[in-house]
Image: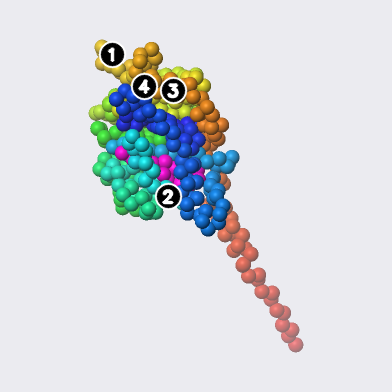
């Protein structure tokens, strides 16, 4: 799978272990490719080669043994960019004309999602085992500190305004709102989804949390965990498991993409009632890898299609006040169209993403037996095995 992230003045496209950083400063198009596998080997080589004389191998957890970028995120001001890979490393870059690697730190378990705190002092890394670790931005050599833990794999994480709460979603259908930084204080749970919760997004006005799930629904919650509205994205008997949702404060739109689907849906949010209104669908030719809004409110799509990999759409208001999402004119000599042309002619860059295993398989819970019933049965068996046998009655002869 490939990833697309919009930066302050461009985009970052990710395939395999490579970041393709595109800058659009002053209308000029600049591309910088950064291979984090080279960064990892360089750092580990400095640490261990003097002792062993051998180049260390990556502790990769993927089934095919290939290292890949698993999660990434810009800081709120776009000054920093964090990346986690399958070799269980956290990379922190300082963004600019030339991206500087600030730190390359080990993480204890495979990362699933990460985010920055609003004050940009920490990176929060959620992992496959349900834990969240906090890594300092200001002290790049400091290791991670355990912040909180779930009982199942975490699938998304975010922080609310002024870092008051950290919100986490897991594979067992649960959303947890915890105080920050004292996250042992659980503010509330959001319990309504019937399948794994894949994606979270946050809206400041009105202050709500929006979640998407494998059950094909989107739920709007208040900060106290109450359901304000619920929308079923699926049609008929076919469930569309939600892959990613994103709220854009500029266009006031919510975008929704689905697992292994070429469909993207758009919704508006009514401020007073927190109701979602479905306004439009866009049908592509291939499954959507990723999507994002840029600073102008333009919507970017990344699909698994050679020659037509990236598309961009404008969100405009009609004369009636409704919002319409339309593909941009590809004939215009804009900087954005230059970016699209560059990637659409570079399918080689996406080859590794095309062959990557589908991580969504891990979202689905494995069918497990009733553990409590097994416990009771084993307890009863042990009691029967240790129960003393009845003593035999001794017969006494009487003369």
Q: How far apart are labels 3 and 1 at the CA level?
A: 31 Å
Residue nearest the observer in this picture, 214 or 203: 203
**What stretch of residues is rendered in magenta?**
79-91
Please give the name of the residue rendered at 57% of the width and 42% of the height, measured from the top-left corner: 65
Q: Residues within 10 Å of mark 2 (few under 14, many from 20)?
A: many
**Where is mark 4, residue-wise?**
336
Q: How far apart are labels 4 and 1 at the CA level?
A: 23 Å
The image shows residue 110 at horizontal and vertical percentages of 48, 46
Residue 105 got which mark? 2
* Apparent side of residue 126 relative to residue 65 in the rendered image (left or right): left
The image shows residue 145 at horizontal and vertical percentages of 38, 54
The image shows residue 85 at horizontal and vertical percentages of 47, 42
Dominant secondary structure, magenta = strand
Residue 388 belongs to magenta span: no
Please give the name of the residue rendered at 37% of the width and 54% of the height, measured from the top-left corner: 142
Residue nearest the observer in this picture, 152 or 135: 135
**Where is mark 1, residue-wise?**
318
Q: Residues within 10 Å of mark 3 (few under 14, many from 20)?
A: some
Closer to us: mark 3 or mark 4?
Answer: 3
Is 199 placed above or below 395 here? above
Q: How far apart are labels 2 and 4 at the CA level?
A: 34 Å
- Say which quarter of the image contains residue 391: bottom right
Q: Secondary structure at mark 4?
A: helix
Residue nearest the observer in this picture, 12 or 129: 12
Q: Secondary structure at mark 3?
A: helix
Q: Residues within 10 Å of mark 1 (few under 14, many from 20)?
A: few
Please give the name of the residue rendered at 29% of the width and 25% of the height, measured from the top-left corner: 26
Q: Secondary structure at mark 1?
A: loop
Please give the name of the residue rendered at 35% of the width and 29% of the height, measured from the top-left corner: 23
Closer to us: mark 2 or mark 1?
Answer: 2
Closer to us: mark 3 or mark 1?
Answer: 3
């Amino acid at each position: 799978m490939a990833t697309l992230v919009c930066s302050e003045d461009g985009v970052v496209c990710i395939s395999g272990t490579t970041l393709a950083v595109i800058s659009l400063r002053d209308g000029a198009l600049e591309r910088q490719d950064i291979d984090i596998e080279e960064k990892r080997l360089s750092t580990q080589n400095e640490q261990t080669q003097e002792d062993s004389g051998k180049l260390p191998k990556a502790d990769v957890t993927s089934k095919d043994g290939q290292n890949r970028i698993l999660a990434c995120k810009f800081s709120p001001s776009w000054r920093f960019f964090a990346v986690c890979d399958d070799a269980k490393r956290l990379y922190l870059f300082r963004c600019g004309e030339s991206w500087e690697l600030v730190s390359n730190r080990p993480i204890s378990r495979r990362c699933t999602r990460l985010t920055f705190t609003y004050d940009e002092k920490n990176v929060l890394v959620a992992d496959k085992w349900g834990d969240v670790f906090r890594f300092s931005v200001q002290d790049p050599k400091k290791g991670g500190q355990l912040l909180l833990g779930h009982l199942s794999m975490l699938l998304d994480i975010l922080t609310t305004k002024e870092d008051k709460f950290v919100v986490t979603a897991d594979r067992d259908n649960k959303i947890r709102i915890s105080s920050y930084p004292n996250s042992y204080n659980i503010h509330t749970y959001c319990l309504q989804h019937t399948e794994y919760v894949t994606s979270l997004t946050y809206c400041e006005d009105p202050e709500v949390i929006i979640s998407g799930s494998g059950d094909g629904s989107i739920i709007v919650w208040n900060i106290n965990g109450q359901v304000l509205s619920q929308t079923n994205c699926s049609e008929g008997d076919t469930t569309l498991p939600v892959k990613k949702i994103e709220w854009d404060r500029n266009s006031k739109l919510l975008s929704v993409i689905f697992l292994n689907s070429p469909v993207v849906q758009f919704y508006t949010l009514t401020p007073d009632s927190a109701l979602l209104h479905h306004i439009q669908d866009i049908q592509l030719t291939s499954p959507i890898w990723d999507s994002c809004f840029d600073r102008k409110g333009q919507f970017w799509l990344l699909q698994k299609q050679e020659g037509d990999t990236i598309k961009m759409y404008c969100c405009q208001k009609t004369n009636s006040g409704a919002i319409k999402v339309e593909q941009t004119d590809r004939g215009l000599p804009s900087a954005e169209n230059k970016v699209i042309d560059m990637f659409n002619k570079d399918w080689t860059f996406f080859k590794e993403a095309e062959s990557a295993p589908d991580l969504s398989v891990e979202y689905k819970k494995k069918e497990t037996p009733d553990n409590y019933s097994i416990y009771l049965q084993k307890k009863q068996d042990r009691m029967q095995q240790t129960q003393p046998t009845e003593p035999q009655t001794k017969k006494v002869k009487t003369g």
